[in-house]
Image: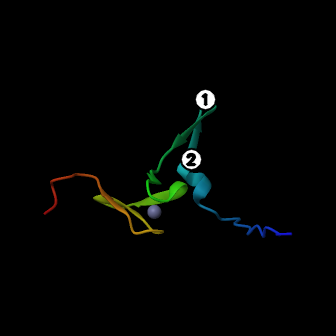
Amino acid sequence: MTKKVRKKHPNSKKSEKYEVKGGELKRKSKFCPKCGSGVFLAEHKNRYSCGNCSYTEWKDKGEQK
Ligand SMILES: [Zn+2]
């Protein structure tokens, strides 16, 4: 029997990344294509990056200086 321990995150910022408009759930952040839904990409100035697998997605492709 496996007991799932649910960690309580009273200050979880995950909910802040969702925005409910008219009953529709809108994602503010992108999900990591490697880790799948549930893992958000951290937004940086010019890129998104996954803290889980280090996946990086550039916002402006071809404009890296
Ligand atoms: Zn990832």
Residue 18: numbered disc: 2
- In this rendering, the answer to whether 26 lies above or below 11 is above
User: Mark 2: few, some, or many residues within 10 Å (few <14, many ≥20)?
Assistant: some
Which residue is found at the position 46% from the left and 51% from the top? Answer: 29
Q: Amino acid at mark 2?
A: Tyr
The residue sitting at the front extreme is 1
State yes or no: Cβ of the residue under disc 2 lies below 8 Å from any atom of ligand 1.
no
Q: Amino acid at mark 1?
A: Gly
Give the image location of residue 22, x and y in percent: 60, 29
State yes or no: Cβ of the residue under disc 1 lies below 8 Å from any atom of ligand 1.
no
Give the image location of residue 61, x and y in percent: 21, 52
Give the image location of residue 4, x and y in percent: 79, 67
Task: Tell which quarter ligand 1 is in.
Answer: bottom left
Residue 46: numbered disc: none
Residue at mark 2 to residue at mark 1: CA–CA distance: 13 Å
Residue 22: numbered disc: 1
- In this rendering, the answer to whether 48 lies above or below 20 is below
Residue 7 quadrant: bottom right
